[in-house]
């Protein structure tokens, strides 16, 4: 009998732009929530958490849990920046100092497990000036991540650069269909409506996931046989899976380990 090959696993480490949302947050979605649409035969373990920076993800033991679970030949996609830029104590990092340092630590730790790190720049926020020009707010964080990728020879998926092109093409009005913009009464989870310039609705998350999946395939980070639906033009809003709130809470609680001092 032949040797049974273990199914490959893709781990996701990141913030709210990546995380799998609770049903009570629909139609808000992270791109990691939509990634299984394109690699359905791969186990995707979404460890990303809303409000996480590279600093808090490590200090609160989430990276420790991920490293315990990762096995040789698994992929670990690392995507931080949206929260690192905030001034909050306990989450902020400086792009060319501790942000790069923490990304480098994660890369080294993943490689020590025999797994393969992949850096993914964060998608841009939706902020336009009075003339309709996109104002990239992530500043130096995408550049800082690109430098780490080059210095450590890590594959980089530049979601930020790709998203900037898409947001500019869509413009102020079109991007409202990508981000969580809802009229009052449009969705029961947001009875007063929403105007969110950071978080995506399902369609935007799916297209970001499609871009990332194509990069994984075209650059041979995963074998081509794993991919499906990359040319499928559209998906229904219920194509992605949502977590019940109690399941979400349990995953938050259990996917954290004590960090050694």
Image: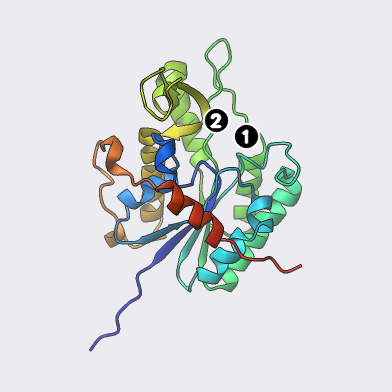
Q: Residue furthest bottom?
A: 1
21 w.r.t. 40: above or below: above
Residue under the image location 67 percent in, 61 percent down: 105
Of residues 40 and 128, the one nearer the viewer is: 40
Circle 2 sits on which residue? Answer: 125
Tell me what residue is drawn at x 59 percent, y 59 percent: 62
Q: Camera-side residue: 63 or 246?
A: 246
Mark 1, other Cα within 10 Å: few <14 / some 14–19 / many ≥20 = many
| Placement of 115 over or under 140, stated as above or below | below
| Quadrant of the rendering where the C terminus is positioned | bottom right
| Image location of residue 162, percent across then percent down | 47, 36
Residue for point 26% across, 52% down = 228
Q: Determine which quarter of the picture holds residue 209.
A: top left
* Mark 2 Cα-neighbour bin, 10 Å: few <14, some 14–19, many ≥20: many
Q: Position of residue 249 (x, y in %)?
A: 50, 52
Q: Which residue is mark 1?
A: 138
Q: Which mark is residue 28?
A: none
Give the x, y percent position of residue 259.
69, 65
Identify the coloring: rainbow
The quadrant of the image that shows the N terminus is: bottom left
Q: Residue 8's x, y, as percent?
A: 38, 67
Left or right placement of residue 183 versus residue 236 in this view: right
- Are circles 2 and 1 on residues that touch, CB within 8 Å? yes
Element under disc 2: loop
31 is higher (above) or lower (below) than 6: above
Q: Secondary structure at mark 1?
A: loop
């Amino acid at each position: 009998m032949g040797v049974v090959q273990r199914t490959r696993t893709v781990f996701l480490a990141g913030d709210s732009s990546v995380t799998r949302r609770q049903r009570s947050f629909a139609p808000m979605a992270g791109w990691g929530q939509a990634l299984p649409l394109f690699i359905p035969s791969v186990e995707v373990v979404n460890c990303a958490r809303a409000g996480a920076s590279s600093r808090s993800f490590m200090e609160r033991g989430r990276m420790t849990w991920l490293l315990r679970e990762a096995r040789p030949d698994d992929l670990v996609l690392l995507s931080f920046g949206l929260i690192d830029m905030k001034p909050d104590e306990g989450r902020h990092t400086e792009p060319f100092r501790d942000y790069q340092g923490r990304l480098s630590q994660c890369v080294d730790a993943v490689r020590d497990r025999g797994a393969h790190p992949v850096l993914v720049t964060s998608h841009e926020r939706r902020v336009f000036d009075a003339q309709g020009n996109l104002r990239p707010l992530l500043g130096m964080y995408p550049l800082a991540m690109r430098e780490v990728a080059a210095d450590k020879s890590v594959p980089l998926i530049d979601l930020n650069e790709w998203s900037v092109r898409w947001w500019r093409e869509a413009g102020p009005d079109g991007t409202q269909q990508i981000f969580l913009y809802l009229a009052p009464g449009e969705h029961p989870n947001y009875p007063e409506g929403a105007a969110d310039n950071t978080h995506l609705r399902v369609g935007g998350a799916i297209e970001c996931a499609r871009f990332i999946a194509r990069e994984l395939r075209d650059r041979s980070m995963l074998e081509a046989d794993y991919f499906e639906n990359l040319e499928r033009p559209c998906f229904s809003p219920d194509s992605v899976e949502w977590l019940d709130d109690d399941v979400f809470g349990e995953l938050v609680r259990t996917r954290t380990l004590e960090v050694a001092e």
